[in-house]
Amino acid sequence: MKTKTVRTIFIAVLIYLPLQYGIVGIVGYHHSEPWPAFVFPGFKSVHVYDNGFEIQQTYFDVYADGADEPERMLPQYFFPDLPLSQVPGFLRTHFQSSEDVQQLSPGARNWLKHHADAAAGVDASRIDVVTEMNYYSHDEMSLRHDSTAVKHIFSIELAVR
């Protein structure tokens, strides 16, 4: 390809992408968001097999001293300041294995305690990070929840204020 052709393509794409997303924003504001013609690739988080699929879900069970049952929270409510698109990556980075959880510094545990106190409205003493696999099956016109299996539970003992 000639240099001029490459520059022309580059400039055309440089103009096309912001214009496309601007139009999507305007249309989305007035109706519902349409799919742009050109988007970056996504990565599947729902594993499909034969006549079913599985979805992994992580919860934070916040335990207070003396409470029988934990306050169960979804990660997006436990970390409301994180953009929703960043929550799965944050969980993978910090709560994927028992080693990750054990390596939390005392400052991080203290931050989690203050955050759990505010988010759950309790005086938190422990957080369990629970990852479950939900299995579903389907046929032509129906969807059934088959089972739920706990993949792992990591307990975090919280620092005292």
Image: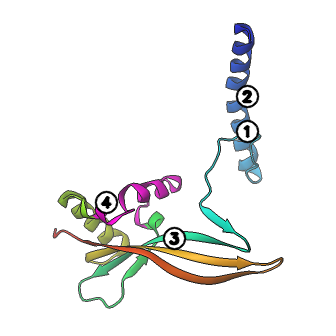
Residue shown at 68% from the left, 69% from the top: 49
For marks 4 and 1, the one nearer the N-term is 1
Tag 3 and tag 1, C-beta contact below 8 Å: no
The disc placed on residue 16 is 2
Question: Per the image, is 89 magenta?
Answer: yes
Q: Residue furthest front?
A: 50
Which amino acid, mark 1? Phe
Give the answer, above or below, for where 150 lies relative to 5.
below
Tag 2 and tag 1, C-beta contact below 8 Å: yes
Which amino acid, mark 3? Gln
The disc placed on residue 38 is 1
Q: Secondary structure at mark 1?
A: loop
Q: Residue furthest left?
A: 160
Mark 3 and mark 4: span between their CA atoms? Answer: 18 Å
The quarter of the rendered structure image containing the C terminus is bottom left
Mark in the foreground, 2 or 4: 4
Q: Secondary structure at mark 2?
A: helix
Nearest the eye: 47 or 143: 47
Q: Position of residue 59 (x, y in %)?
A: 44, 72
Mark 2 and mark 4: span between their CA atoms? Answer: 43 Å
The quarter of the rendered structure image containing the N terminus is top right
The disc placed on residue 100 is 4
Q: Position of residue 119 (x, y in %)?
A: 37, 69
For marks 3 and 4, the one nearer the N-term is 3
Residue 14 visible? The answer is: yes
Which amino acid, mark 2? Tyr
Q: Residue furthest bottom?
A: 68
Give the answer, above or below, for where 87 lies relative to 25.
below
